[in-house]
Image: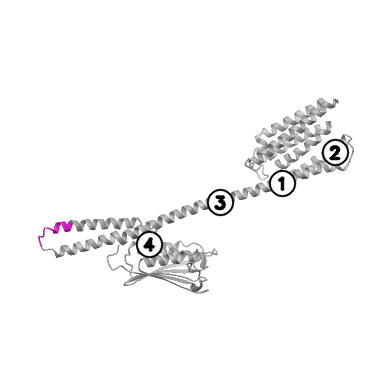
Amino acid sequence: MNRSGETPTGKTPIEPPPRTTPVALALRLCLHALLAGLLVLAAVRAVADGGSRGGSVVAAVVAMGGVYAGGTLSPAVARSRRAAAVWLAVLGACWIVLLVLSPDGLWAAFPLYFLQLHLLPVRWALPAVALTAAAAIASFLLHGSPVSPGSFIGPLLGAAVAVATVLGYEALYRESERRRELIDELMATRAELAAAERTAGTLAERERLAREIHDTLAQGLSSIQLLLRAAQRALPAGSPAAPHIEQARAAAQDNLAEARRFVRALSPPDLERGSLAGALERLSASAPPGSDGSHVDVQFTVSGTPAELPTPYEVALLRTAQSALANTFQHAGAGRAEITLSFMDTSVSLDVVDDGRGFDPASAPRGGDGDGDGGFGLPAMRARARSLGGTLSVESAPGQGTAVAVTLPLPTGAAL
């Protein structure tokens, strides 16, 4: 297409025709029937009058009907505005001939208005409608009809009705298309939300299974192994029960290793590629923009000597950091946030601090804790910490940022 808007073939493309709705199809059929009926009426009246022009009128009617039928069946008219303009020009010329031969050709102006408004741009259609109305008015003078206000009002009123009808229908169609697009977007968003909820549910169930396996099977097998080892040491040398105890201890050890493998397989994907510290480091590096579109600088530090933590501990700390940062990005309007993972002698703690707008925890909605996400952020963090025997605290004030701290006691037994 060149800069003038024409294709290399010289045709000016038009927008694809709208989807054929039942209403549009009914209007189109009514337009065909209206023009055909008016042409037949003109031919019948010319033949019935018995005038010398009867044959010419019939020929003009046939010619105009043939041009009209050819244009409605031609794909080029629907694809190209230039082809549509040429077709309308030829059809208009046939109508002018009919108008000169018979005053009954005047009534064909009304369907021509609709064709011009439908196929031509508004800047061309309105002048074409005005010229058609002027030709219809001139036909009264040409055939010596008495001049009256109706001679002018009729064609002009018909043109006004056609313009209002077509432009009104197009406005309604555009509004309908906008609503359809909004509905499509809504349906797509609902599908994405449903997929996200399924994914979140799957991850939550995996975490729950990992926690249950760790808290029940793995801990039980670990205790059995320790008890069997103590029983081995208590047996006298050469005891016939020693081989059986050894087999039982080996079976418990193998099953404990298998339980640990299940827990690792069910851990969140963020922890599958490394340690908790690595997952928190990646979380800090991939921070999205804040609620106002500004960049949030997130720093991560580790305090103390890192120790291997049970998978449920790592999951709880990672999810707490993710939820706290989500609140920071979405609601705090912060420019800076810090994540600190601290390993102490008997506990491990995670602190997430930001310099955002803060809130008053005492006046926060019941169950919401000021997190602004419908009341599931901070309560979920507290539930995670409480399930592992830990605590979660929130310190904040309007204009002074927010600090979220979770502390978990380290397990006394072997780390899983």
Answer whether residue 356 is magenta in the image.
Answer: no
Callout in the foreground (2, 1): 1
The segment highlighted magenta reads 237-246
What's the mark number on residue 360?
none
The residue tagged 3 is: 185
What's the mark number on residue 167?
1
Quarter of the rendering occupied by the N terminus:
top right
What's the mark number on residue 315?
4
Give the CA distance from mark 2 to mark 1: 26 Å
Mark 4 Cα within 10 Å, few/some/many (few <14, many 20+)? many
Residue 271: horizontal and vertical position, in percent?
37, 59
Q: Badges 1 and 4: C-beta atoms under 8 Å apart?
A: no
Residue in the picture at 70% in, 41% down: 118
Residue in the picture at 35% in, 62% down: 312
Residue 302: horizontal and vertical position, in percent?
38, 69
Answer whether residue 245 is magenta in the image.
Answer: yes
Mark 2 Cα within 10 Å, few/some/many (few <14, many 20+)? some
* Amino acid at circle 3: Glu
Q: Is residue 350 left or right of residue 253?
A: right
Give the CA distance from mark 3 to mark 1: 27 Å
